[in-house]
Amino acid sequence: MDTKKLKNLIELAKESGLSELTVEHKDDRVTLKFPYGQSVAAQPMMAAPAAIPSAGASATAPAPVKDENLIEVTSPFVGTFYRASSPDAEAYVKEGDIVSPGKILCIVEAMKIMNEIESEVSGEIAEICVENETYVEFGQVLFKVRKK
């Protein structure tokens, strides 16, 4: 991995407050761990790999939960959750709405980039798990969708 890409990864971690970042691409694998409460520049350590989605991913794959018909849609990265495209716009979805694959559910802003999160399943929005304009973590549940 070239120096520019590595610097971009460190900057991403710094801006989003990550404590650990692992990136795998082809034959390259880089894991950065940062002690809690210290700056990102403080002594990163190599650690066991853990896969994370690429920044270009629109959403993580839904993960089934206890109720087999209830699917969790999680955040593919750290950022700010927005229910609508602008403060004056109507929310993309609300509880009870029926969605299908490709339907935009929300936006997660990361590094000043607005990333549209799309549904990967057909179903009904059973629960919106995050308040508008809230900071979300990687893997945090954003919506619960009841499969139809």
Image: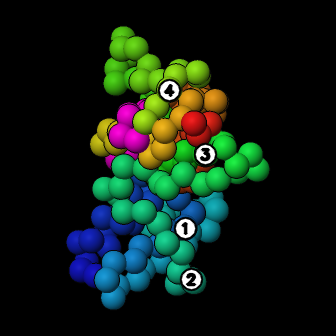
Residue that label 4 marks: 98
Is residue 90 in sight in this rendering? yes
- Mark 3: amino acid: Glu
Spatial CA distance of label 3 from label 2 is 28 Å
| In this view, the mark in front (1 or 3) | 3
| In this view, the mark in front (3 or 4) | 4
Question: Which residue is painted at 31% across and 56% down in the image?
Answer: 56
In the image, residue 5 lies at what x, y percent? 27, 71
Residue that label 3 marks: 72
Question: Which residue is painted at 40% across and 14% down in the image?
Answer: 90
In the image, residue 106 lies at what x, y percent? 43, 33
- Mark 1: amino acid: Glu
Q: Earlier in the sequence, mark 1 or mark 4?
A: 1
> Image height check: is 93 above or below 9?
above
Callout 4 crowding tier (Cα within 10 Å): few <14, some 14–19, many ≥20: some
Residue that label 2 marks: 47
Is residue 78 in sight in this rendering? no
Q: Which residues are magenta?
A: 101-112
In the image, residue 127 lies at what x, y percent? 64, 30
In the image, residue 81 lies at what x, y percent? 48, 35
Spatial CA distance of label 1 from label 2 is 9 Å
